[in-house]
């Protein structure tokens, strides 16, 4: 995984740890596996998103082309992610 916003990423990881939430690490693990399980070599790139504690991600292949693009979104209280969910939740989830 390639972190394009290291300082922000570190702050979000600290926040998740401070509230005892494991959903961020679970989602990061899922994204990492996406990059490893592709038929082609790929890497997940993480960027800062406008929503608090959230990220944009891109799956980038070795030739530079893009695969899946989405968000690693924090649904807090209040939820300021601007993302639709069927059920109210607290924590991180992957949106594509």
Image: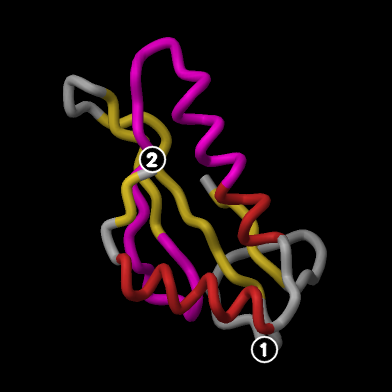
For the view shown, which residue lies furthest in the right direction? 87
The residue segment tinted magenta is 29-55
Residue sitting at 52 percent across and 20 percent down? 37
Vertical relation: 35 (above or below) 58: above
Q: Residues within 10 Å of mark 2 (few under 14, many from 20)?
A: many
Vertical relation: 35 (above or below) 81: above
Residue 92 place in picture, x, y as percent:
64, 63
Vertical relation: 64 (above or below) 19: above
The picture quadrant where one finds residue 46 is bottom left
Q: Sequence order check: which comes first, mark 2 or mark 1?
A: 2
Give the distance between the C-alpha atoms of the residues marked 2 and 1, in whole angstroms.
Answer: 28 Å
Q: Nearer the viewer, mark 2 or mark 1?
A: 2
Q: Which residue is mark 1?
A: 78
For the view shown, which residue lies furthest in the left direction? 63
Tell which of 95 and 57 is nearer to you.
57
Q: Secondary structure at mark 2?
A: strand
86 to the left or right of 67 = right
Q: Residues within 10 Å of mark 1 (few under 14, many from 20)?
A: few
Residue 22 place in picture, x, y as percent:
72, 63
87 to the left or right of 61 = right
Residue sitting at 55 percent across and 64 percent down? 73
Q: Which residue is mark 2?
A: 44
Count of picture labels: 2
The picture quadrant where one finds residue 61 is top left
10 to the left or right of 60 = right
Residue 40 highlighted magenta (yes or no): yes
Residue sitting at 48 percent across and 55 percent down? 71
Residue 41 place in picture, x, y as percent:
34, 18
Tell which of 78 and 63 is nearer to you.
63
Residue sitting at 62 percent across and 50 percent down? 27
């Amino acid at each position: 995984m390639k972190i394009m916003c290291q300082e922000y990423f570190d702050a979000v990881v600290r926040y998740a740890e401070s509230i005892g939430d494991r959903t961020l690490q679970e989602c990061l693990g899922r994204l990492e596996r996406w990059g490893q399980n592709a038929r082609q070599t790929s890497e997940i790139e993480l960027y800062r998103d406008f929503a608090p504690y959230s990220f944009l991600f891109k799956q980038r292949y070795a030739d530079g082309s893009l695969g899946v693009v989405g968000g690693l979104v924090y649904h807090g209280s209040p939820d300021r992610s601007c993302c639709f969910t069927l059920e109210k939740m607290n924590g991180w989830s992957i949106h594509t």
